[in-house]
Structures are given as structure tokens and as C-alpha cells.
Amino acid sequence: MKRRSFVQKAGLLTAALVSGKMLSFAADPGFPIVRKSIELRRFTSRAVENAITEFTDKVKNKELGWLFNNCFPNALDNLVTYSEVGGKPDTFLNTGDVDAMWLRDSSVHMWTYLPFLKRDKGLRNLVGGVINRQMSYVLKDPYASSFYNDPLKVGSMKDDLTTMLPGVHERKWELDSLCYPIRLSYRYWQQTKDTSFFDAKWQDAIKTILKTFKEQQRKDNSGPYHFQRTTLWATDSLPMEGFGYPVKPVGLICSAFRPSEDATVFSFLVPSNFFAVVSLRQAAELFRVIKADESLAKEMEALALEVRLALQKYAIIEHATYGKVYAYEVNGMGSYNLMDDANVPSLLALPYLGAISMTDPVYLNTRKMVHSVDNPFFYKGSLAEGIGSPRITKHMIWPMSIISRGLTSTDDEEIKLCLKMLQKCHGDTGVLHESFDPDNPKQFTGSPYARANSLFAEFLWKTYQERPYLLV
């Protein structure tokens, strides 16, 4: 489990604490130096530095330029450990507040740099090293969400009632955790046309992912995975002897936990099943590109179709106010959970993941619902509005939800609103956090929150490339 965040007070002090390092402020008290000095950075990319220079020189809004300067290189500066093993790149990427690598987080961080791979061979090797490391972890334990760099380390979660292996940090089964490495591999190939990392180990890992997905359809039994924890937090453990509440086997894939690492109420987590459809199709395409097992590619496509049809049948609910909407969770028996969580995958972020069209009428209805009081985790304050999470206390918005809203919008005014709210939410620290109080952004949790910073940098760069006139 990632460290439970606590609310902090932020202000314009004489120094900023970033990733454990005290750094002096710049001469302008409004824009403190947040980045580590060059000699302390873990990895430097010329292409990334050039992009930072271009953005800060050409964007009129100097505060957004400062935020991009801080957020875009954050993962390279603070999180990566690069080496070569057996002549192949190998990259460990800690999550920031815990010295463990999450399959989800590491994919998000590298995603931000993918448009620059053609300009920087070192950066390309770094991302390839992440893919290599991720596939090693999948083969080690496909049900685990995060891993240590030391394969023999026994961590603080060793007493969880599940099959804990040395080197595993946390063994929460989160369907999206196996989707993200496929997403990263696929986009890496799109950007580079390089297939050198899709070797026998990569192919075995994809086969393992397919096997795990099928196990968690739970057609014949509850599958091999179970999880319980002795904890005061109800969302950190599963009921029914660690298998979660029953589901009807209708073709959907169970996810014991959400991307927020909270236990699901109904195990068919709809956003993650949509994500799985996309990932299975991408993996099938890659298998054909590298001329691997054609029968396996067809098997992946068949599973993708099965899940997609089940989503159409069981995930769409008739809402009295909004019409047809997507539920957040279902059990295949008619029970459903109407809400959305800030973490990606979310219902809001489905077009961002390539799972659905931004013009899909059910999605548009759902988008209205999740940005209303009918979503129990939607909050609105004097400075911002957005979606939070049951992971933390009430009335705290996660910047990730505002970023997802911006990334899935085609409306200039809405994108501008998202930029404005994000500009206000950093609490004078120059980086984004896990969550913030929409009435007082100096009250926040999780500082800095690396995944939010990578997503924000992606949003800023996308806006700069497509709608630079909004960055004023």
C-alpha cells in the first residue's frame, strides 16, 4: 500500500522540499527553484530539455511555463534508475513516496516522453528498459501491482493473507496494472517501429496476461487469487475469505482493486474492462507485427470482443436524470455502482485510453453525471471543481480528474477552465499533489504526486501542440 497521505500546509517559505532535497528559491519569490540541480538528477535527456526550453520561451503564461519546467522532467530527475542487464536496457522507476515500482505509474511516467524518442536514443533505451523490467515483473507475479528493485527484499506487506513472494511490494490485483505495460509497449512501437524489446520474455509475459484475464473471468471457479489484510481501512482488504463479493460469470474480468488501490464493491470494474479491450487488441496487433503466435493473437481478439459485448449488455444503466450512462462497477446480477473515481482508468478518461469515442452518447451522458452531485465523489469549491476518491477524506479534489477532463475535451472554454484550475491548485509549491482542497489549495495531500505531475505535463504539451492560444 502506498503511504496514506496526510494534509499539509504549503506556503512561500525560503526553501522547497522536493523528493527529500532542500533547494533554494529563485530570486522571484513567485517562482521558486523546484528542480534538483543538474548534478543530482538521475537521468538527463537533451530532447526533454529542449522541449522545456521551447515551452517556457513560447508560452505567454509564465506560471504555466514554470509548472511545465517542474513537472515534465520530474520522473527523470527523481525516479529512474537505469542500467543494462545482459546487454539490454533495464530501468527501475520508483513511485516517489515509496521505493517500489508500480506497473501503472511507471507506464504513465514514460508515456509523457514517448513523443521525443526519435530525437533521443538514450531516452529510447530508458523506455525500453522500463518495458523489459515490467515484463519481468509480470512473469514474477501477474497479480501483484508493485515490486522492489531488490528481488529478494521482503517488505512491509509481508503479512498480507495472499501468496507474497520476495521482491513483491504489494499484491493487490488491479486489472489496469496488466493493461498499462501493453499500452506502453504499443505506443513505443508506434513511435519507433522498434520491435527489439518484444522478445521471448515479452511474449511469455503477454501470454501470462491473457491467462490471468481469463482466470479472472471466473467462469468455472473463483480463480487462484485472494487477498486479505489486517487493517483499519475497510477498502484495503477483500470480504468473503479474500475473494470479494460474488459475481455472475458473464464474460467481464474481475478486478479486486481499483487503480486507487481501494477494493472494488462489485468486481467487474467497468473502466478497467474497457481498458482491457483496448489492450488485448493492441497486444494481438503486436503479435502479428513480430510474427509471433497467430492463434494467440486470435484468442486475444476473441476475448476482447467477448468483454466488449458484455460491457454493452451489463455496464449501461438507465439513469432517471441523464439517460443511459456507464456504471462504475457491476456484478452481472443487476447490481451496480454509479460513481467515478479520479484515478485513471476512470469513466471520465475512457476516450483518453482509446476505449471509446468522445462523441459516444452514453459517454457524454456519463460525463455529465460524474461532474454532478450524482457522483458522490464530485466536489466543488470556490476555486475549483472536480472528482476525488474514497481513498482520502471528503471535499478533496484530485488534480488527475481535472487533467482527465481536459484531455478528453474538444471545447476551448472547458480546456481553458481546466488549465486555470490546475494553475491554482499547486499551493505555491510548483508541483501537483495527490489531492487539494478546492477552497484552499494550500491544504493538500501527497507532495509531490509524481503520477499527477507526469499527466499534467502531458496535458500541457498536448495543449501547446494543438491549442497554444489557450496557454495565456
Image (cartoon, rainbow, N blue to C red):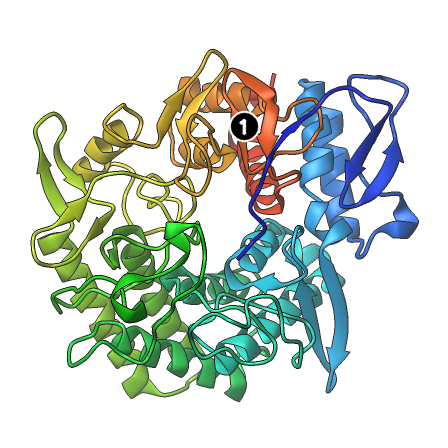
**Residue 423 or 406: which is nearer the viewer?**
423
* Picture residue at 54% right of the left edge, 18% below the top: 420
Give the number of callouts. 1
Where in the figure is residue 133, as x and y percent of width and height?
61, 74
Query: Looking at numbered disc 1 in the image, what kind of residue is underneath it?
Result: Phe
Where in the figure is residue 127, as x and y percent of width and height?
64, 64
Q: Is residue 228 left or right of residue 461?
A: left
Identify residue for label 1: 436
Asked whether residue 442 appears in the rendered view, the answer is: yes
* Picture residue at 44% right of the left edge, 43% below the top: 391
SS label for mark 1 = strand
Q: Quadrant of the C terminus?
A: top right
Where in the figure is residue 22, as x and y percent of width and height?
86, 38
Where in the figure is residue 52, as x and y percent of width and height?
74, 37
How crowded pointer 1 is (Cα within 10 Å; few <14, some 14-19, many 20+) is rated as: many
**Residue 345 or 155: which is nearer the viewer?**
155
Please identify the quarter of the rendering in which residue 118 is found: bottom right
Q: Is residue 189 above or below residue 223?
A: above
Q: Is residue 283 left or right of residue 94?
A: left
Asked whether residue 411 appears in the rendered view, the answer is: no
* Picture residue at 70% right of the left edge, 24% below the top: 10
Q: Is residue 136 above or below residue 409?
A: below
